[in-house]
Structure formats: C-alpha cells, structure tokens
Amino acid sequence: MWLIIGITVLILIVLVLAYLLRPIYRPTCLNLRDVHVVITGGSSGIGKELAKQLLNEHQAHLAPDNNERLLCLSVDVSGTYSNIQKAIEQACQYHGNRPVSILINNAGIFYAKTFDETTPDDFEQMGK
C-alpha cells in the first residue's frame, strides 16, 4: 500500500517538475528568412494556408535578390517526372540557382465517394 502511494507521489513530483521546467526545453523556432521552400498542393486548403503563413510571418523571404517573394507554378504532380523536374529547375533558377531547402509535400487527390463506390481506376489514380 505504502509503495503504491510512494510511487504515485514520485510520479506527481516528476510531472510537476517537468511542467515547471518546460520553458527551458522549448525548442527555438527556425529562422526561415533565407530558405527556398517548395509547397506542393499550395493552390488550396492546407498548402495555401502554409504558404500564407510563411509569407505573412515574414520568416520566409523566398527571393532575396528580387522584389517578388513568391513564385507560383501550375504543375500536375501526378503527371510525368519530367514536368516536375522542369518546375523544380524553374523554381531554383528563379531563386538564384539555390537548391530547395524545404519541401512540403502536400499535394493530394480528393474523391467524394464512399469505399464501395470507388472503382479500381480511382484507387490507381490515388496511388500515382
């Protein structure tokens, strides 16, 4: 009985100390001022909001040598690899031939069908 109470008190002490000391262990935010960020699926939804946040916070200055901070490319990422490669090369050239620092792979396909309405072709398209 006393052993269980002692262990419980010890656990509570550890939890209280961890709570009180949490600011010491809080990781610092990365400075994204001079990075080259590529967001797939950035035309809507989560990708669009991520792009807005990066630009609004002034943490991601995506083209430091230019007044333009954002390059928008329309690329079908479910298409051929050469289309994607050309788009990445174009983005790197736009940003002074700097390589991509951060890739946020957010592109996805949305199907508004139930499982039993989904055809094998739909599944194949989702897997591409």
Image: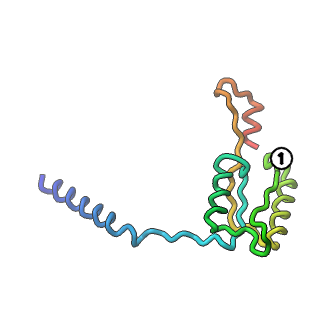
Identity of the residue drawn at 79% across and 49% down: 77
Determine the secondary structure under disc 1: loop
Which quadrant of the structure image shows residue 100? Answer: bottom right
Compared across the picture, whether 70 is left or right of 24 comes to right
Describe the colour scheme in one phrase. Answer: rainbow
The picture quadrant where one finds residue 126 is: top right
Q: Position of residue 101 (x, y in %)?
A: 70, 68
Residue drawn where x is 28% and y is 63% of the image: 16
Picture quadrant of residue 119: top right
107 to the left or right of 20: right
Q: Position of residue 59 (x, y in %)?
A: 63, 68
In the figure, 61 relative to 127: above or below?
below
Q: Residue at x 79, y 46 (%)?
A: 78
Towards the viewer: 115 or 33? 33
The quarter in which the C terminus is drawn is top right
Alpha-carbon neighbours of circle 1 within 10 Å: few (<14), some, or many (≥20)? Answer: few
- Which residue is identified by label 1? 79
Three-letter residue code for mark 1: Gly
Residue 55 image offset from top left, x and y in percent: 67, 62
Q: Residue furthest left?
A: 2
Residue 64, placed above or below residue 19? below
Instruction: Give the residue displayed 79% in from the left and 72% down from the top.
Output: 66
As drawn, which residue projects farthest toward the bottom? Answer: 65
Question: In the rendered image of this protein, does residue 81 appear above or below residue 100?
Answer: above
| Coordinates of residue 67 in the picture (x, y in percent) | 78, 70
123, 66: nearer the viewer: 66
Is residue 100 shown above or below 118?
below
